[in-house]
Amino acid sequence: MILYDWGSREWHKIAIRRCDSGPCTLVTIRKDSWTWIIGTLIIRFVGVFVVLVVIMIMLIVSGRIFSSADTKKGKEKPQPVVAK
C-alpha cells in the first residue's frame, strides 16, 4: 500500500509493505523534509492550544452564569413566619 499526502508529491510518499515471512510490516517514509515535519508539529500544537482556549472560555462563561444565578437566589428575602 502506498499513501500520498497532499496529492502525489514524491517527497510525501509513505509505503507500507508486509513481509512474506512471518508477521512483520515494513513502513518506509521517502524523501521527507524538515519543513513538512515542523509544519505538521506546529499545526498540531496550535490546534491543541486553540481547543484548550475554547474550553477555558466556555468554562468561564458557564461559571459566570451559575454564579449570577446563585447570587439572584441569595438576594431573595425570606418570608417571615407569622405565628397565630
Image: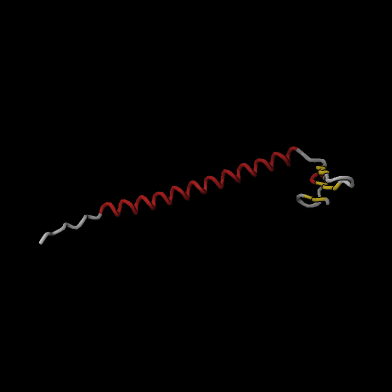
Toward the front, the furthest residue is 22
Toward the right, the furthest residue is 20
Location of residue 9 in the rendering, given as x and y in whole percent from the top left corner: 81, 48
| Image quadrant in which the C terminus is located | bottom left
Location of residue 69 in the rendering, given as x and y in whole percent from the top left corner: 34, 54
**83 relative position to 65: left or right:** left
Q: Is residue 69 above or below residue 26?
A: below
Location of residue 56 in the rendering, given as x and y in whole percent from the top left corner: 49, 46
Q: Is residue 39 above or below residue 76?
A: above
> Looking at the image, which residue is at 39% across and 50% down?
64
Q: Nearer the viewer, residue 35 or 55?
A: 55
**23 relative position to 54: left or right:** right
> Looking at the image, which residue is at 78% across and 52% down?
7
> Looking at the image, which residue is at 82% across and 43% down?
28
Location of residue 22 in the rendering, given as x and y in whole percent from the top left corner: 86, 45
Q: Nearer the viewer, residue 67 or 6?
A: 67
